[in-house]
Image (cartoon, rainbow, N blue to C red):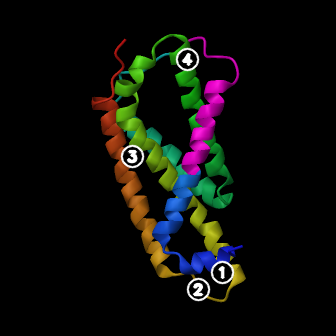
Amino acid sequence: MIKLNDYLEKKPPKQIVFILISFFLVIYFLGVLKGVLSGEPLNDLELGQNKYVSDIYLNNLKVSLSILLMGTITGGVYSIIVMFLNGFILGKLLQYLAINNMLYIVPAGLLPHAIIEIFSLCMFSAISMFPILMLYHFLKSSAKIPCNIIIFSLKILVFSIIALFAASLLECYVSNVPL
């Protein structure tokens, strides 16, 4: 079995982030599956179309920064919960749309922005795991934390913020719900 500390020392940050993003995507889709397959379906749904880019962006940024901050403090537990719940909400939406024969709105109403938005949330979640991994690394070895991990995390953070803005633009101007 590979020791985590050895893994952190030998793997480049890109591989670690890829594994963490994959982990959070799995958590997200488990939430979607749980939402689709369980519980009472939604009785009513209000699909908001009159949103501004700034409102969407600030809301997504608020969620992402809470994932980053609280996920860091809790060692990623908060990030796991938020990603699962976001997936669960999408699952409930898909369940509602399926019951009401409205799945046709998913490609135009959801896909243009959702892929980028979900990926950005996963990147924020992955970054939130770095401090606990680095703390573990620091406690298990005398080696200092590699500077390239910190720089790489900052690059991902900036990329994620820009991607969230792009997702907000897509949600406002491209995604539409044909009812």
**Residue at figure coordinates x 68%, y 74% from the top left:** 2
Q: Nearer the viewer, mark 2 or mark 4?
A: 4
* Of the pair 67 and 31, the residue shown nearer to us: 31
Q: Under tag 1, what secondary structure? A: helix
Amino acid type at image mark 1: Phe
- Determine whether label 1 and label 4 are within 8 Å by CB: no
Q: Is residue 118 magenta?
A: no
Indicate whether 32 appears above or below 142: above
Magenta segment:
24-44
Q: Which residue is mark 3?
A: 164
Instruction: Name the residue type under label 4.
Output: Tyr
Residue at image mark 1: 138
Q: CA distance from mark 3 to mark 4?
A: 26 Å
- Which badge, 2 or 3, comes first in the chain's sequence? 2
Q: Which mark is residue 156?
A: none
What residue did someone put label 4 on? 96
Q: Identify the mark nearer the N-term, 1 or 2.
A: 1
User: What residue lies at 65% left-to-right and 50% top-to-bottom?
Assistant: 78
Instruction: Give the amino acid type for the residue marked by disc 3 in the picture.
Output: Leu
Determine which quarter of the picture holds residue 170. top left
| Relative side of 77 to 64, left or right | right
* N-term mark: 1 or 3: 1
Residue 137, image x, y percentages = 65, 78
User: Is the Cβ of the residue at disc 2 closer than 8 Å to that at disc 3?
Assistant: no
